[in-house]
Image: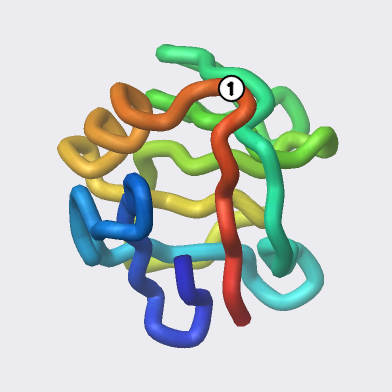
Amino acid sequence: MQKHTNLAWLVSDGVTSYGPVRISHGKPGFGTPVGDFPVLRKVKNDWSVPYNGPMPNAVYFTTDGVAFHQGDLNSQSHGCVRLTWNDSEVFYDNLFPGERVQVLP
C-alpha cells in the first residue's frame, strides 16, 4: 500500500490480483508504520480495546496491533489501514499468516 496515494492492492507473483482500492491510514501521532511486514494473524470480528471500536475482517501485520480492517475511509485511524466493507473482505480472504505486507510512504 502507499500512504501518500491512500491506495492499496493485492499482488501475487508480481502481478496485481486486486485493486488498487481506496484506504485511510494512521493520523499524525498514530502513523501507520512504513516497511515490510509479515501477516501475523487474522480475526474475523475483532474489537479494539484501546480505542473501543469494531475491527471487522482484521488482518494484523505488526505486533502492536496494526491491521487492515473495515472502517471509515473519511477519517484517519490510530495506525490501522481502513478499507471499505467489500475490500476488507477480499483482503481478509486473500491474505494469510506469513505472507508479506509492504507499506510505502
In the picture, the quarter occupied by the C terminus is bottom right
Residue with the mark numbered 1: 97
Q: Nearer the viewer, residue 72 or 85?
A: 85
Image position of 46 (left or right of 90): right
Q: Which residue is found at the position 32% from the left and 29% from the top? A: 94
Q: Nearer the viewer, residue 103 or 15?
A: 15
Residue 19, above or below 66: below
- What is the secondary structure assignment of the residue under circle 1? loop
Q: Position of residue 88 (x, y in %)?
A: 30, 37
- Inspect the image, locate mark 1, and give the three-letter code of the amino acid beneath it: Pro
- Specify the quadrant of the image occupied by residue 103: bottom right
- Picture layout, residue 76 above or below residue 11: below
Q: Residue at x 36, y 58 (%)?
A: 14
Considering every residue shown, the one lying at the far front of the view is 13
Residue 53 drawn at (x, y percent): 54, 31
Instruction: Locate residue 9: give its quadrant.
Output: bottom left
Image side of residue 34 versus residue 46, left or right: right
Label 1 crowd (10 A; few <14 / some 14-19 / many >=20): few
Say which residue appears at 39% left-offset and 25% top-offset: 57
Residue 10 in the image, given as x and y percentages of width and height: 33, 50
Look at the picture and state if 1 lies above or below 70.
below
